[in-house]
Image (tube, rainbow, N blue to C red):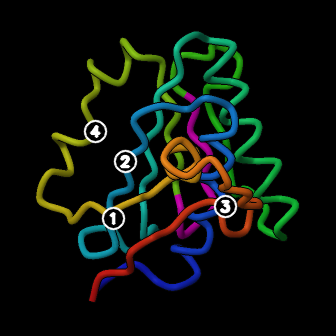
């Protein structure tokens, strides 16, 4: 089984939102095979507690604007690891130290990684990049 088209659309919006708030080291993992409740984990790093909260807040705001409400959220008060669950997409925004400690990529190493190409990386290479939120992220759907 692979991640649904709906989950990939959620991922596009979430990744663009994370990038807009200086989220770093974005990794999307297709967990649809071992987990019946989610298709994709998006893992993002923030440099400080404020940055972690800002990234999670922006992701939540942009997905709500796109018509998707979170099912639950955890960790916002501490700002060290914020989890926002949108059903098909579960977003983990970590402070750098927590990301290394919990190492979710290692725990889910048997699952395929979904490539994410961010607009900010393209904009640096192509100064004329004027991508909006809808086209800011390219996701390569894997069969």
Examine the structure image and report whether residue 83 is included in the region drawn in magenta.
Answer: yes
Q: CA distance from mark 2 to mark 1?
A: 8 Å
Circles 2 and 1: CB atoms closer than 8 Å = no
Q: Residues within 10 Å of mark 3 (few under 14, many from 20)?
A: many
| Residue 104 screen position, x and y as percent | 28, 39
| Residue 119 screen position, x and y as percent | 58, 53
Position of residue 100 relative to residue 118, above or below, is: above
Where does label 2 land, which residue? 27
Q: CA distance from mark 2 to mark 3?
A: 14 Å
Q: Nearer the viewer, residue 74 or 93?
A: 93
- On residue 114, the disc is 1
Earlier in the chain: of badge 1 and badge 4, it is 4
**Type of secondary structure dominating the magenta stretch:** strand
Earlier in the chain: of badge 2 and badge 1, it is 2
* Magenta segment boundaries in residue numbering: 82-89
In this view, the residue farthest toward the right is 65
Earlier in the chain: of badge 4 and badge 2, it is 2
Q: Nearer the viewer, residue 74 or 90?
A: 90
Q: Nearer the viewer, mark 4 or mark 2?
A: 2
Q: CA distance from mark 4 to mark 2?
A: 10 Å
Element carrying mark 3: helix
| x 56%, y 39%: residue | 83
Position of residue 7 relative to residue 42, above or below, is: below
Element carrying mark 1: strand
Q: Residues within 10 Å of mark 1 (few under 14, many from 20)?
A: many
Q: Nearer the viewer, mark 1 or mark 4?
A: 1
Where does label 4 land, which residue? 104
Examine the structure image and report whether residue 41 is included in the region drawn in magenta.
Answer: no
């Amino acid at each position: 089984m692979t991640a649904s088209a709906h989950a990939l659309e959620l991922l596009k919006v979430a990744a663009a939102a994370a990038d807009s708030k200086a989220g770093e080291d974005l990794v999307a993992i297709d967990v649809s095979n071992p987990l019946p409740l989610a298709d994709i984990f998006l893992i993002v790093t923030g440099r400080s507690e404020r940055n972690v909260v800002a990234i999670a807040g922006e992701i939540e705001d942009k997905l709500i604007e796109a018509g998707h409400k979170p099912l639950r959220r955890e960790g916002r008060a501490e700002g060290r690891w914020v989890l926002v669950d949108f059903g098909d997409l579960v977003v983990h925004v970590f402070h750098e130290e927590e990301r290394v400690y919990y190492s979710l990529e290692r725990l889910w190493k048997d699952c395929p990684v979904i490539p994410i190409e961010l607009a900010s990386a393209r904009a640096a290479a192509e100064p004329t990049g004027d991508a909006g939120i809808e086209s800011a992220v390219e996701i390569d759907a894997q069969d």
